[in-house]
Image (cartoon, grey):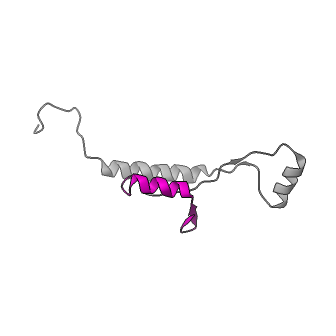
Amino acid sequence: MTNVGTTVTPPAVTECRAAAGSQVAREYRGFAGVVARPPDLRTRLLVRLFGCPFGDLRDWTATATWIDDITASIGRALPTTHFPATGNPGE
């Protein structure tokens, strides 16, 4: 795995980034997910022993911030369009 700061980039993400090129795939951010409660007591005890929590661990604020960053960069990359469009480019 490739280290990017404190984030570890999975090999599949690195391969996709290389295939898409630097203009398309700019960065990777890993987010926590949902950890379902194991059905059997033994597994639950082992997971708790290692200090892993159950439940929804997603940071929705961080996810929304990342989405805002993406939309802002897309908005800066697009040309300005004026509506309504006319048949004459000079108008």
Q: Which residues lie in the magenta part?
A: 1-25
State the residue in front, 9 or 61.
Answer: 9
Q: Position of residue 73 (x, y in %)?
A: 38, 53
Is 12 on the left or on the right of 83, as rendered?
right
Q: Residue at horizontal 20%, vertical 33%?
A: 85
State the residue in front, 81 or 23.
Answer: 23
Residue 19 lies within the magenta run: yes
Task: Name the image quarter holding the N terminus.
Answer: bottom right
Is 89 on the left or on the right of 52, as rendered?
left
Residue 84 lies within the magenta run: no
Q: Residue at horizontal 50%, vertical 58%?
A: 14
Q: Residue at horizontal 50%, vertical 53%?
A: 66
* Residue 28 appears in the picture as rendered: no
Q: Residue at horizontal 12%, vertical 38%?
A: 89
Q: Residue furthest right?
A: 41
- Residue 89, compared with residue 15, is above or below; it is above
Q: Position of residue 59 (x, y in %)?
A: 62, 52
* Residue 31 appears in the picture as rendered: yes
Q: Position of residue 45 (x, y in %)?
A: 87, 54
Say how many tags the image has.
Answer: 0
Tell me where residue 21 sits by quadrant: bottom left
